[in-house]
Amino acid sequence: MTVYVVLLRGINVGRHKRIAMTDLRRLLADLGYRDVATHLQSGNAVVTSGDEGPDAVAVAVSEGLRDRCGLDVPVVVRTAETFAAAVSANPLEVVDPSRFLVLFCSGTLDTRALSSLDMERYPDERLAVTATEAYTVHEEGLRQARLPDVVARHTDGVVTGRNWRTVLRIAEMTR
């Protein structure tokens, strides 16, 4: 059995794409996942399942949300091991967890393009990248953040971000 971290993009932000976490837990259980747990109201779940792989879990959850809830929601999935590796790989100092994001990507990042960004254009932000995650610091707060959109333009997949405090809590849930 494999533990998966399921990250829904854009859930419960504003009026659209609303789903109660009780409904999400029920949907995940109905899809055959076990040990279903959610964190916060923003589409973070941890489930246990067979070894079908993160991509298959993402497709199943996305289709389930569309078929049962009428929601078109991008889903990014990591195994507990790859999620923990993303936490360990963080190369930036976390001074304020609420101003620090990990951007999880369903595809690969164009690390060459992102590494060559002129960071002087983003004086209050910092960026570090791996093949599938980007780490960003936003000194002026997330409302002023420009780098998450830049990162999203440099991937062949979907990007969803979580602040550092949420990332650490989800990591705890996988143990």
Image (cartoon, rainbow, N blue to C red):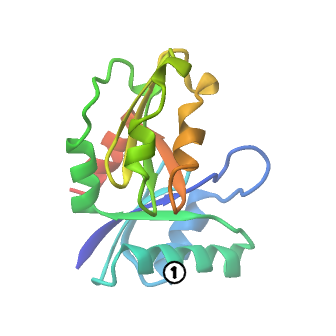
58 and 50: which is toward the camera: 58
- Residue at left offset 50%, top offset 15%: 124
Q: Seen in the image, is 98 located left or right of residue 11? A: left
Q: Quadrant of the rendered structure where residue 71 is?
A: bottom right
The x, y position of residue 143, in whole percent, is: 63, 25
Q: Amino acid at mark 1?
A: Ala
Q: Taking 65 as reference, is 67 above or below it?
A: below
Q: Name the image quarter holding the C terminus.
A: bottom left
32 and 66: which is toward the camera: 66
Q: Quadrant of the rendered structure where residue 166 is?
A: top left
Residue that protrudes farthest toward the right in the picture: 15
Q: Seen in the image, is 80 located left or right of residue 16? A: left
104 and 153: which is toward the camera: 153
Which residue was labeled with disc 1? 60
The x, y position of residue 171, in whole percent, is: 28, 49
Q: Taking 10 as reference, is 148 above or below it?
A: above
| Residue 41 shows in this picture | no
Q: Taking 77 as reference, is 162 above or below it?
A: above
- Residue at left offset 21%, top offset 52%: 85
- Residue at left offset 26%, top offset 44%: 87
| Residue 59 shows in this picture | yes
